[in-house]
Amino acid sequence: ADELCFLDITASHEDRGILFDVVTRTAEACFMPLTVGGGVRKVEDIRALLLAGADKVAINTAAVTNRPFVKEAAEKFGDQCIVVAIDAKQVTPGRWEIFTHGGRNATGIDAIAFAREVVSLGAGELLVTSMDRDGTKSGYDIGLTQRIADAVSVPVIASGGVGDLDDLVAGVRDGHASAVLAASIFHFGTYSIPQAKAHMAAAGLAMRLD
């Protein structure tokens, strides 16, 4: 893998703190860039995560409820390590809205407009998850991914819905994502990372295979 994303998706919903001990142990065993998110609410959380070994920090619910936090974080730590995680659901054809607290709470906020706003505030990367597709193994929401990727100037990571290796290719080729995230296909051994990379390279996508 080129990067590991460690996301505690119930931290905000359960009003829990960040699992710093798990992050520290993961960072010690992980020799690739590590992005950590879940329960990040203040600048001190970001500082502590970076000290614990995270390379980048993902802000989700707090980016919606406290937009100035994104700007403050980017100014203090640099936009290269501030990721805004966007959880969105399609509400009408061609319109997606932001959901918070692990995809549980509707906000009524347009996902594309929100993406543009947080990038203008300093987000250096967007992790875009389709809550409609997450866990379905039916492929990324290409419409959502493409609309956001085409609307912003920073890298977009596609997330939610991977069922096979062709979905990874589609995320980049059709969704215009800079990178693709998958979980269950690797967790349960359906495919390996080398298989995924080889498949994407065979499809003509630039890949680091070492």
Image (cartoon, rainbow, N blue to C red):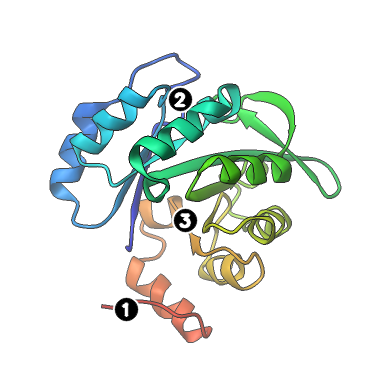
- Crowd tier of the residue under label 1, counting other residues whose Cα lies within 10 Å: few below 14, some 14–19, many 20 or above: few
Residue at the extreme top: 15
Q: Which element carries disc 2, helix, strand or loop?
A: loop
Closest to the observer, 112 or 17:
112
Q: Which element carries disc 3, helix, strand or loop?
A: loop
50 displayed left or right of 202: left
Q: Earlier in the sequence, mark 2 or mark 1?
A: 2
What distance separates the C-alpha of mark 2 from that of mark 1? Answer: 34 Å
Percent x, y of residue 181: 47, 56
Q: Name the residue under label 3.
A: 181
Residue 110 lies, with reference to residue 137, above or below; the image says above
Q: Which amino acid does label 3 sit on?
A: Leu
Tell me the residue at 40%/65% (across/down): 191
On the rendered image, what quadrant is the N terminus found in?
bottom left
142 displayed left or right of 189: right
Q: Can residue 188 be seen in this view?
A: no
Percent x, y of residue 11: 42, 22
What distance separates the C-alpha of mark 3 from that of mark 1? Answer: 17 Å
Q: Earlier in the sequence, mark 3 or mark 1?
A: 3
On the rendered image, what quadrant is the C terminus found in?
bottom left
Closest to the observer, 114 or 33:
114
Q: Do the residues labelled 3 and 1 touch (CB within 8 Å)?
A: no
Q: Mark 1 points at which residue?
A: 209
Tell me the residue at 33%/73% (across/down): 194
